[in-house]
Image (cartoon, coloured by chain):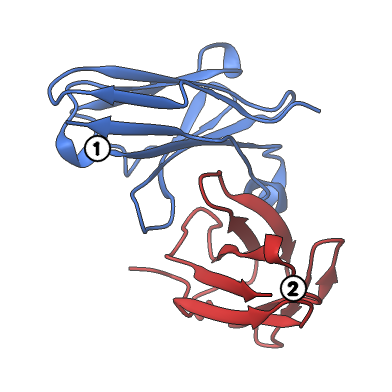
Amino acid sequence: DAKTTQPNSMESNEEEPVHLPCNHSTISGTDYIHWYRQLPSQGPEYVIHGLTSNVNNRMASLAIAEDRKSSTLILHRATLRDAAVYYCTAPGNLIFGKGTKLSVKP
Amino acid sequence: EAGVAQSPRYKIIEKRQSVAFWCNPISGHATLYWYQQILGQGPKLLIQFQNNGVVDDSQLPKDRFSAERLKGVDSTLKIQPAKLEDSAVYLCASSLGRGLESFGEQYFGPGTRLTVT
């Protein structure tokens, strides 16, 4: 019983922005939304997290819907090194779905 | 700052044998997690420790899996006896573990790839 829903795969061109969506309709008021990514043969890597407001860091931006039932991870300029599986976790932060496999074309 | 260390990186055993994995978290991180990741799936939480106490082990198959975190620092995960379906990558992660926000900001080790034949 996955608590987040993400598209199985997405494709992007290098140096273009990428918007990765996640639905978390069962989220509670105190649940943070966390995003991770996993490169091949590596452990997941923390990307960003937020509660209500949009967040920016050196890796990405996180846009959270006003009702908090969905969020979007934004990679402003995709590079080949961004090709990975992206997971959003919420509620509880300890449940990972299958994630979105992002492919980046040169 | 050193990351989460795990060993071994790879292990091949026959079914019904036993195996143990070791994890050393980031210094100062109170919370430690063990995950199982089967090929093509996301990580599945097996057990969560806060210092040396168990917070959640509801998905740990306790008839064959055991884990301990002595002295609240490093941890071992054991499987005895192993089954074919235990073939997976076993990931260890740690977090500061203070407050709801920091529980989710986990730092993962490289994992141990287990193959059971």
Q: Residues within 10 Å of mark 2 (few under 14, many from 20)?
A: many
Residue that appears at 43% across and 64% down: A97
Kind of residue at badge 2: Ala
Q: Which chain is blue?
A: B
Q: Is residue B68 above or below residue A90?
A: above
Residue under label 2: A78
Residue B20 seen in this snapshot:
yes
Q: Residues within 10 Å of mark 1 (few under 14, many from 20)?
A: some
The tag on residue B86 is 1
* Alpha-carbon span between mark 1 and mark 2: 36 Å
Q: Where residue B24 appears, x then y in whole percent?
A: 60, 21
Tag 1 and tag 2 share a subunit: no
Residue that appears at 57% across and 81% down: A11
The quarter of the picture where the C terminus of chain A appears is: bottom right
Image check: A45 left or right of A92?
Answer: right
Quarter-of-image position of residue A16: bottom right
